[in-house]
Image (cartoon, grey):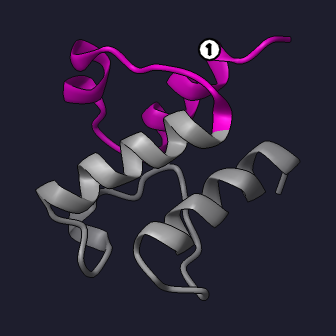
Amino acid sequence: MSNFETRVQNVFREVFDNPDLNIYREMQAKDVVGWDSLNHITLIMTLEETFKVKFSTREVMGFQNVGEMMDCLRGKLPA
């Protein structure tokens, strides 16, 4: 797992209060206990704060899984 993926996983663990949570690209909200609309907003805001980026509403609404979220996030980071 890359440093980027570890940082994203740590955000998920913090937001969902689960130190054993392991993310994977195909993971969806239905796969995580407690991933409801409120925690989704918290997740997005925490990722934005952690990585110093901003997601557009269109981007957030388009995420089908964790992999798409991570790809979008990675695309916002400096090379």
Compared to residue 20, the image places residue 2 above or below, namely: above
Magenta stretch in the rendered image? 51-79
Compared to residue 45, the image places residue 37 above or below, namely: below
* Residue 56: in magenta span: yes
Compared across the picture, whether 45 is left or right of 48 comes to left
Compared to residue 24, the image places residue 64 above or below, namely: above
Coordinates of residue 57 in the picture (x, y in percent): 22, 18
Q: Quadrant of residue 13?
A: bottom right
Compared across the picture, whether 31 is left or right of 61 comes to right
Name the residue at 40% across, 58% down: 27
* Residue 64: in magenta span: yes
Residue located beneath label 1 in the image: 76
Name the residue at 31% across, 18% down: 59
Q: Quadrant of residue 4?
A: top right
Q: In the rendered view of the protein, which quadrant contains the N terminus?
A: bottom right
> Secondary structure of the magenta portion, mostly?
helix
Q: How many marks?
A: 1
Q: In the rendered view of the protein, which quadrant contains the C terminus?
A: top right
**Mark 1 is on which residue type?**
Lys
Coordinates of residue 19 in the picture (x, y in percent): 60, 86
Q: Viewer-proximal residue, 20 or 16?
A: 16
Compared across the picture, whether 20 is left or right of 5 comes to left
Name the residue at 40% across, 75% down: 16
Name the residue at 28% across, 28% down: 60
Task: Report crowding for label 1: few under 14, some 14 to 19, many 20 or more residues within 10 A (C-alpha).
Answer: some
Coordinates of residue 71 in the picture (x, y in percent): 56, 27
Secondary element at image label 1: helix
